[in-house]
Image (cartoon, coloured by chain):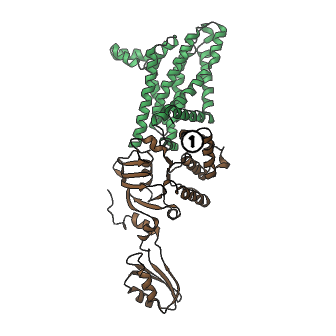
Amino acid sequence: MNGPGIIKTIAKRELLAYFSSPVAYVFIVIFLLLNGFFTFMVGGFFERGEASLANSFFMWQPWFYLFLVPAVGMRLWAEERRVGTLELLLTMPIAPWEAIVGKFIASWLFLGLALLLTFPVVLTVNYLGSPDNGVIFAAYVGSWLMAGAYLAVSCITSAITRSQVVSFIISVVACLFLILAGFPPVINLLQSLTNNWQWLVDVITSFSVITHFEGFQKGVLDSRDIIFFLSVIGFSLFTTSVILRTHRTS
Amino acid sequence: MIKVENLTKIFGTKRAVDGVSFTVGRGEVLGFLGPNGAGKSTTMRMLTGFLPPSSGKVTVGGYDLAEHPIPAKRLLGYLPESAPAYTDMTVYGFLDFAAEIRGLRGDAKKSAINRVVDLCFLKSVLHQNVDTLSKGYRHRTCFAQSIIHDPDILVLDEPTDGLDPNQKHEIRQLIRKMGETKAIIFSTHILEEVDAVCTRAMIIDRGKMVANGTPEELRRKSEWAGAVTLRVHGVAATAVQEKLNHLRAAKKIMTATNGNRVTVTVFPRTAGDGDLTREVIEATNGWQVEELRTEEGRLDEVFRSMTMPDTAGKEAKP
């Protein structure tokens, strides 16, 4: 069997596993509730009177993902190691990267599904006004890419340990760094600490998902932002494969 | 089918497997024996490509496992020691996944699943979730997974562990039957299994191979091999001892008295040449012999003598 076939088989199994346990439903419900609450109550969607979702809806997502994506990603490898199915999976005629990519894609599709289920917000804003749907589409793409970057980081932390809890905590901390590096108060602090060495501040902020997500929120599909998210994903998945290999050799 | 050369695995400072070499061909069932922690599971994990060896080489069906892992793994079926299975799937879902990842599709997949469900008696739990299964069923589910693609080579780590006596019997029958056309390596610490199933047995202790041969050959290494046991009536124990102790082929004797019956076992100097039996029969001329038999040798005794640190006469490793 060829690579894509194997990846599809693994991704299918992983997706089925999400939906055969309550995890998937709990996650989707909480994600939608949080989105609704923050958009309408905290974000003041109605009070703003803007035909846009940028400031009321999308701005919260980096923070939701901070807790929700590690919850989706924490079981990916930790569970395989705990139950021992890793031994089964890696003695099957597949390359380890196929398993890593397959599992990642399954979780990413799942996050995409949860994101798509927020469509009533789009319907609402279209009913009330006439927003630029191109901007909304770009922001959705950006949001999904950002979720993928968080998820890939969770893959690494999940491969490190057989405990899902440990995996969750480490990946929240790692993702928090990805957010805070571009958070205005942190940027100000960095500037004062580094004596306004702008290049250093720029290097650090360039790792922030927020900086790269901003473009998408404005409706700009900048190839640099897309490449940023894809390279975080690629690098993290590569690191995952190194960690899995190291476990077996040591 | 499978060839292992000088396989070594080092964990930190411990040599878990130390220079093990063997081959298994089609039609052979190799029993892998050894005390707990001897390196059986580590060896099997290296054979199946889960653990990379520290040194040494594994060749599976002509493919070097390190260089061409995927074609080599296609030929293998593997039952890990803990018999893991995805707990969030049904038995059917799990087997369906195993079949698909082995490249089976459509009707071929369906018939493969049906075949292993019949072989492993899983029909009654087919649509049950794996985490609700009893240990025996879970074990058989994982076993079913290992044979779903009808592999040429089977590596089974304690395949009868946790099964009830009937299930053990069924699985042994199955292994023996499949062993006619496949190369099978299985580990166990149940010695009867070696007799029941194996064409060849290997004993491994502290990472090193200490014996390799057919069950008969191994048994012949026992001091019981070729020993003659007889029970006589109405002869004094001392007289029996006196006479049998002086036989040329006898190494030592063991006597037990029960009323006026004496049971005596005479151990041979060299096993298997029949001299001892002849001499014993000559010596007993005129006695009332109620029973006389030649022992075949005992595997458990061979196993103990080869794996016990004090009697094996080997240096203890640091």
Label 1: which secondary element? helix
Give the residue at mark 1: B99
- Number of on-image labels: 1
Rendered hue of chain A is green
Q: Is residue B226 above or below residue A73?
A: below
Q: Is residue B228 above or below residue A35?
A: below
Residue toward you, A25 or B274: B274
Identified at 48% across, 34% down, the residue is A98
Rendered hue of chain B is brown
Residue toward you, B200 or B131: B200
Identified at 51% across, 40% down, the residue is A80
Q: Is residue B201 visible?
A: yes
Residue B216 on image: x %, y %: 45, 68
User: Left or right: where does residue A234 sit relative to residue A58?
Assistant: left
Output the chain of dot 1: B
Q: Looking at the rendering, in which quadrant would you find the C terminus of chain A?
A: top left
Residue toward you, B193 or B37: B193
User: Left or right: where does residue B259 sit relative to residue B16?
Assistant: right
Residue B93 on image: x %, y %: 61, 40
Residue toward you, B159 or A17: B159
Residue A82 on image: x %, y %: 51, 42
Q: What's the residue type where badge 1 is placed?
A: Ala
* Quarter of image, res B66: top left
User: Left or right: where does residue B280 sit relative to residue B127?
Assistant: left
Q: Is residue A184 visible?
A: no
User: Left or right: where does residue B18 sit relative to residue B194?
Assistant: left
Mark 1 is surrounded, within 10 Å at the Cα level, by few (under 14), some (14 to 19) or many (20 or more) other residues, namely: many
